[in-house]
Every structure is written in C-alpha cells, then in structure tokens.
Amino acid sequence: MRELFFTFSWQDLRQHPWRSLAAALAVMLGVALGLAVHLINASALTEFAQATQAINGQSDVQLRARQGLLPQRFFAAVAASRWWRGPTRCWRRRYRPSPRRATR
C-alpha cells in the first residue's frame, strides 16, 4: 500500500501542491455544508413540530398528583411561579413552594 502511495500519489502531490490543497479544502467545505444543511433541517422540523403542537392545543406541562387530587392552592402557586416557562425547561425539577412573605 505504501509503495502504491509513493508511486502514484506522492509524485502528484509534489508536482501540484496547490491543487492537492484545493481538493482537500473542497472536501472539508463539502462536509461542513452537509452538516450545516442537516442541522438547519433538524431545527426546522423541531420548530414545525412545536408549532403543530401549539396549534393542536397540546399542553407543554402536565401536573399530576402521585396519589389523590392536587390542592387548589397548588395551581395558583404554580401559575405564579416561572420555573417552568422560558427556553430552558427543567422537567425533572420538583416544585418547592417558596416560604410565605409577610404581607402588609
């Protein structure tokens, strides 16, 4: 294998170094563009799926009790808190109500 490389490829590399460099850069650019298209396509599909869920009225968050029913004060506390909103949602985070503040 090494003999074939030195017989055929090495001579071409020595005679045309810029051509070989241009070919290597073209391959790298092609791989980078292919990756960029793949990432853009995945992002577009994700956004489309989220828009479809929003239009169909599917919920982002579901509150379920482990046993029995959830108390009504819990819903107001969750609606007032902002830990579940925004671009970074932490689904495994457990709700811990903050200590009550003294009201005037």
Image (cartoon, helix red, strand yellow):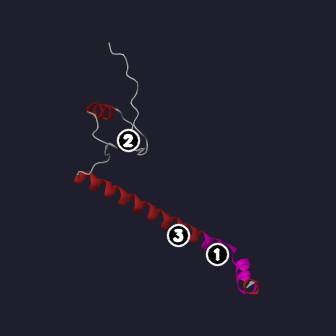
Which residue sits at x=36%, y=16%?
A: 102
Q: Relative to 27, does residue 47 appear above or below in the rendering?
A: above
Residue 86: % across, % down = 38, 41
Q: Earlier in the sequence, mark 3 or mark 2?
A: 3
Q: Residue furthest front?
A: 67
Give the residue drawn at x 40%, y 24%.
Answer: 99
Amino acid type of the residue that numbered disc 1 sits on in the rendered structure:
Arg
Given residues 41 and 78, the one toward you in this image is 78
Q: Secondary structure at mark 3?
A: helix
Q: Nearer the viewer, mark 3 or mark 2?
A: 2
Q: Residue at x 38, y 19 (%)?
A: 101
| Label 2 vs label 1, nearer the camera | 2
Closer to the camera in the image, 26 or 45:
45
Give, as a three-letter code, the residue at label 2. Gly
Q: What type is the residue that disc 3 sits on?
A: Gly
Q: Give me the disc on residue 19.
A: 1
Q: CA distance from mark 2 to mark 1?
A: 50 Å
Q: What is the magenta segment's predominant secondary structure? A: helix
Mark seen at residue 86: 2
Q: Which residue is mark 3?
A: 30
Question: Magenta part of the protein: which range?
Answer: 6-24
